Image (cartoon, rainbow, N blue to C red):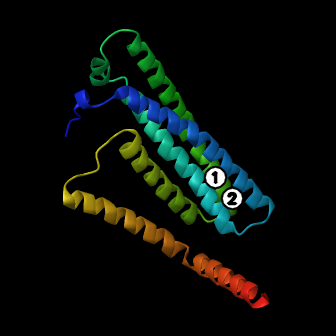
Amino acid sequence: VPRDWNQTSIEWIQVKLGLVLLLAAPLLATLEIWARRAKRGNADRSVIELLAGMQAGLCIGVGNASLATGLQSTSKSWIDHLGSGKGVWMHLACAGAFVVIGVVTNAMHPIFANRGYQLGRVVLISTYMSLVSMATGVFMGVVVLDEAWPTRPRMSLLRHIAFGLIFSGVLTLNWQNIRLFTAAAASRSSQGSASH
């Protein structure tokens, strides 16, 4: 279904995307700090795998949304919607910035993934990366770029099922680690309550 540009505020989309990009940088930095602490502290490799996958997936999801929005912003339909004048040049400058940020962010994902591959399991890092990338992409599309979630019940249901299958796959791949973690947490809480 073609988008009705008369009902769309392109400026508001660009503001929201800019804000998300500003939030993505500190989030990546925070994940990097946690990953370095985990490596120095000899944390379980599943923690390092999760952090590497989250960093790479965030780069892909945010980078693709930024790149796509920047390129789409140069389309004739977007520019015609804006009209003429100084606003068009500002719009095109933002579009160029989004393209550059998208390219740089996408180019960073192999760095995070490869660092994780050196210490962890490729299948888990790739799964985390895919899950975070898809979740970020859906968030960016629906919330930031005002794209419509499918309204037809069957298509909406299929998307929900797909996300559920991906999530269950991640749980299955990590089931042994989850069991060990919950058993350790239960043991700590029972020891803590016994000492009181």
As drawn, the residue found furthest toward the front would be: 196
Q: Which residue is mark 2?
A: 118
Which image quadrant: the C terminus? bottom right
Q: Residues within 10 Å of mark 1 (few under 14, many from 20)?
A: some
Residue at position x 56%, y 73% from top? 174
Q: Mark 1 to mark 2: distance in Å? A: 6 Å
**Residue 115: % across, % down:** 67, 53
Q: Nearer the viewer, residue 31 or 104?
A: 31
Q: Quadrant of residue 152?
A: bottom left
Determine the secondary structure under disc 2: helix
Numbered circle sitting on residue 114: 1
Q: Which mark is residue 174?
A: none
Helix, strand or loop status at disc 1: helix
Instruction: Classify residue 22 as left or right of residue 134.
Output: right
Q: Is residue 70 above or below residue 192?
A: above
- Relative placement, left or right, of 143 versus 32 is left
